[in-house]
Image (tube, grey):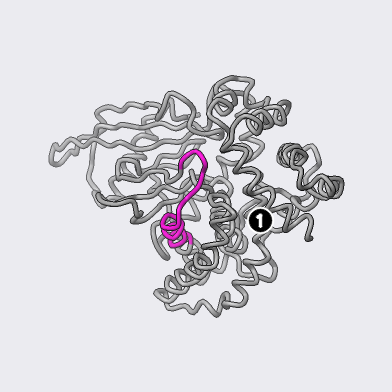
């Protein structure tokens, strides 16, 4: 099987042909040479390995030599526990299917949302290199985005959801994407159920340390996991609400922003990592991206304005396609869905952030050894997270902010 470390000549030809075609250069060529290099010395993610693919091409008609620098993502190699997790999780198969069959139609209907994809097959994805175009992540280690970044993000998110609606109007076959993050009708020993329950145990350990909850602690601990479990129902394709293609994994590192030469206001953004894509109400994506990379204080100040802007963007994108948003989701229906799915943003925040904002030493411990990944996902999660919670102020502050919001509004007031 071809991987990012062993591209076949056929795969390489296909990548280059796709690059030339998508950049309107339908020329014959020969591959002079290519080279693969890791993007960094340390792993950049838990669920994939990342490389730069540098290719030297010679155009046959003109003799012109072109240098391509592309971005590659492959299943992580050399780590049996992580590969087993990936295979059971189904993330690479999902992402390849989305880039092959779904995103092309959605983007053609509305706007560019993701990086151009030149190859999607065999556990390997090859993209345009957004970094060379001035794109970069927008958050520091705290995982927080500012108002301008979120405003920019919501325009791209509205394009994704509007593009899905437009695509559906011209296609009698609705999307079907198997839910792999929060699957239903699976046995208790399924890795995602085990993973979810372990995360809840960690979060309950954090709650035990808070004096404000001591008098109600037994009730909170008895009901916490049940309240968190609502996400398993809410992620499903709705039988009563508008459904669209959702990214499903919108935290700060999956949004890349392009900035101008002057200033820090982003011009546009692209979404990456469609491994958890689903077909469900758009409020789920919306509340996720407005909750994971924000604080409760920020939401109190800005959430209403950002929610209104998203609906305005959606209205405009659909209008350009000759569609009236009220025929799909009236404003009252929209705000009703926001109310229903607000809990999803907080659940996702707790589940994501207890892992992704761990201090660097903990992250390196997880990704840098053969046992680190399996230790976290099976044996040592509470130990690793409690160590970070007790020693790293940033981690503690972020986890407490989202946990208290969840407990106060969805456990104690359920």
Name the magenta segment's main secondary structure.
helix
Q: Residue at x 43, y 76 (%)?
A: 319
Q: Nearer the viewer, residue 63 or 242?
A: 242
Give the image location of residue 6, x and y in percent.
43, 26
Task: Specify the quadrant of the image occupied by residue 12.
Answer: top left
Give the image location of residue 47, x and y in percent.
56, 35
Give the image location of residue 251, x and y in percent.
53, 48
Q: Is residue 172 left or right of residue 261?
A: right
Provide the residue span drawn in magenta.
140-157
Q: Does the segment drawn in magenta span residue 378?
A: no
Q: Residue at x 57, y 61 (%)?
A: 300
Q: Residue furthest left?
A: 62
Task: Specify the quadrant of the image occupied by residue 70.
Answer: top left
Residue for badge 1: 344
Q: Nearer the viewer, residue 239 or 63?
A: 239
Q: How many marks?
A: 1
Rendered view: 46 above or below 300: above
Give the image location of residue 23, x and y in percent.
28, 50
Rendered view: 365 above or below 222: above
Q: Residue at x 62, y 38 (%)?
A: 396
Q: Is residue 223 left or right of residue 6?
A: right
């Amino acid at each position: 099987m071809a991987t990012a470390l062993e591209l076949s000549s056929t795969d390489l030809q296909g990548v280059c042909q796709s690059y030339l075609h998508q950049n309107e250069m339908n020329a014959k060529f020969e591959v002079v040479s290519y080279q693969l290099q890791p993007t960094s010395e340390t792993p950049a993610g838990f669920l994939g390995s990342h490389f730069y693919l540098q290719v030297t091409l010679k155009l046959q008609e003109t003799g012109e030599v072109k240098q391509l620098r592309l971005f590659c993502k492959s299943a992580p190699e050399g780590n049996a526990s992580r590969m087993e997790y990936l295979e059971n999780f189904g993330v690479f198969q999902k992402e390849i299917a989305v880039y092959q069959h779904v995103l092309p139609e959605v983007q053609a209907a509305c706007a560019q949302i993701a990086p151009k994809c030149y190859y999607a097959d065999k556990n390997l994805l090859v993209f345009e290199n957004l970094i060379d175009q001035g794109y970069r992540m927008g958050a520091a280690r705290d995982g927080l985005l500012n108002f301008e970044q979120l405003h920019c993000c919501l325009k791209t998110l509205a394009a994704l959801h509007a593009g899905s609606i437009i695509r559906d109007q011209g296609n009698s076959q609705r999307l079907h994407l198997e839910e792999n993050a929060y699957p239903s009708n699976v046995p208790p020993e399924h890795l995602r159920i085990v993973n979810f329950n372990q995360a809840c145990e960690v979060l309950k350990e954090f709650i035990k340390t808070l004096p404000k909850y001591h008098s109600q602690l037994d009730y909170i601990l008895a009901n916490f996991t049940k309240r968190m479990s609502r996400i398993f129902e809410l992620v499903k394709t709705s039988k009563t609400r508008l459904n669209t293609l959702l990214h499903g994994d919108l935290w700060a590192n999956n949004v890349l922003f392009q900035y101008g030469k002057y200033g820090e206001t982003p011009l546009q953004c692209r979404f990456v990592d469609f491994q958890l894509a689903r077909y469900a109400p758009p409020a789920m994506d919306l509340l996720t991206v407005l909750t994971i990379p924000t604080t409760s204080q920020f939401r109190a100040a800005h959430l209403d304005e950002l929610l209104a802007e998203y609906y305005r963007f959606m209205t405009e994108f659909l209008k350009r396609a000759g569609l009236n948003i009220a025929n799909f989701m009236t404003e009252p229906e929209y705000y009703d869905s926001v109310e229903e799915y607000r809990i999803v943003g907080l659940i996702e925040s707790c589940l994501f952030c207890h892992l992704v904002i761990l201090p660097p030493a903990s992250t390196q411990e997880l990704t840098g050894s053969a046992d680190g990944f399996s230790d976290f996902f099976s044996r040592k999660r509470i130990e690793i997270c409690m160590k970070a919670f007790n020693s790293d102020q940033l981690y503690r502050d972020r986890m407490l902010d989202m946990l208290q919001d969840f407990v106060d509004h969805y456990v104690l007031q359920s």
